[in-house]
Amino acid sequence: MANQSLVDVAVVSHWIDGAERASTSGRTAPVYNPATGAVQAEVALANQEEIDAAIASAQAGFRVWSQYSVAKRQAVLFAFRELLNARKPELARLVTSEHGKVVSDAMGEILRGQEVVELATGFPHLIKGAFSENASTGVDVYSLKQPLGVVGVISPFNFPVMVPLWFVPIALAAGNAVVLKPSEKDPSAALWMAKLWKEAGLPDGAFTVLQGDKLAVDGLLTSPVVQSISFVGSTPIAQYIYETASKNGKRVQALGGAKNHMLVLPDADLDLVADSAVNAGYGAAGERCMAISVVLAVEPVADDLVAKITERIAKLRIGNGAGVDGVEPDMGPLITDVHRDKVSSYVDIAEADGAKIVVDGRNYEVAGHEDGFFFGPTLIDGIPTTSRAYTEEIFGPVLSVVRVSSYDEGLELINSGEFGNGTAIFTNDGGAARRFQNEVEVGMIGINVPIPVPVAYHSFGGWKKSLFGDAKAYGVHGFDFFTREKAVTSRWLDPALHGGINLGFPQNT
């Protein structure tokens, strides 16, 4: 929500023309420290003039950057990679201060993002064209891959570093200029990375940070200059992004929400399952689109599994993600009090629908941080599959157990859902695992792996209402998305063999 300017906190500004630019819009939004509940900064919310300035800067930057040779672009990417590697602890602490996740988890997201930076450094092989000599007599055909121009990236609050790094390095490697609109909840990491790109040698304008809210988003979606939009966030917003940007003639990759299930067969190692369910359900306080939300326990294992998960929850340490006296907790707070209350409302719904709240994280307090946005790890058993708490994405540390009688019943529950982002099966039966990977209607699958996020040289993206648009993030999909192909048919005539006039349709001879 926007608020009046506070004189005692800093304002996180835009990055335009290679420098910080203070906003003149008069609009700001608070940036909280989720562990304390205190406003630690404000972020500028762009007006139309600032939106136009950001896009114009990127357009000018594109004209310069796209003319850099492949070797010079590659050198900038390598320099950025080395700078990021050297300074990642500083960035991790910055993420923790605004998002709330523990420092080690923030470091983990940086390292996964850095994988894409490293992939992008090898871009010459991935954007080269093809050549066919003498396709017809004296005629050669070849293809060129060229940048789109100015591209927009709209990133979510839960991964303020990793998600931009899914898109930005690849877009830049291909010769595009990027306008990044980060979440207004944790905007500082984008500005930090902008400074690093400049230090790495990126020309002014090639990377721009536009702080803002829906006005800034719509400015990117409707601008005739912006050629594509890359987005990660909730499904309703992903669908809006996709429809609006597509209507305005843009390429779109819009990754939406999830309700990820873990199918547990009776032959699975239940200690491994319990560890994995806790790690995947409560890591980053459940604010991950790849978090496990539902454990489908094929009977008769549910009672034992619930007991094992409950035992592990009791040992989790919840607190300030930055740590206290050198001790880091396992889980930090949620991003805002509004989001905490929304998560709590889903537990209320589950309880009203007859589910058993085995471990209740509502009204959780951390000593010394009573005003923080904490929500304890929550375990729900016996939730009806008709409950909104089962069907909708909660995006918090809430794990539900659904008891099923067979593999087939569990598979049907997964496939009948509206999301298709990630899923996992836990079993020691190779045949069952192979059947599952072929039959499940989900884009990313783990076999005894709870969070199956693909490595950088594969691509990230789900099915159904978890992905709008045809292109997934990073990998080969990413390079295809940020380039467009030209096919050139060339003939250099021998004056002595001129063919004369022929009005017939060209033929290969």
Image (tube, rainbow, N blue to C red):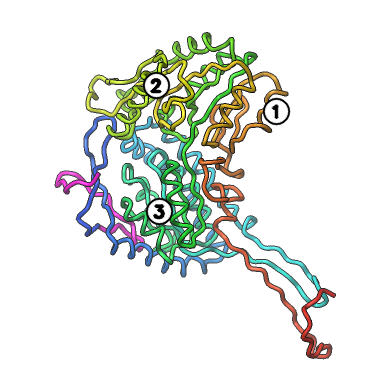
The magenta segment: 1-22
Badge 2: few (under 14), some or many (20 or more) residues near its Cα, within 10 Å?
A: many
Residue 482 position by quadrant: bottom right
Which label's residue is closer to the chain start, 2 or 1? 2
Q: Secondary structure at mark 1?
A: helix
Residue bearing mark 3: 180
Residue 204 visible within the image: no
Contact check, label 2 and label 3, Cβ < 8 Å:
no
Which label's residue is closer to the chain start, 2 or 3? 3
Q: Is residue 73 left or right of residue 352?
A: right
Q: Is residue 113 left or right of residue 447?
A: left
Front-most of 385 and 188? 385
Residue bearing mark 1: 435
Q: x, y (%) of residue 505?
A: 77, 79
Residue 233 visible within the image: yes
Please, what is the three-letter code of the amino acid marked with disc 2?
Ala
Relative to 159, residue 25 above or below = below
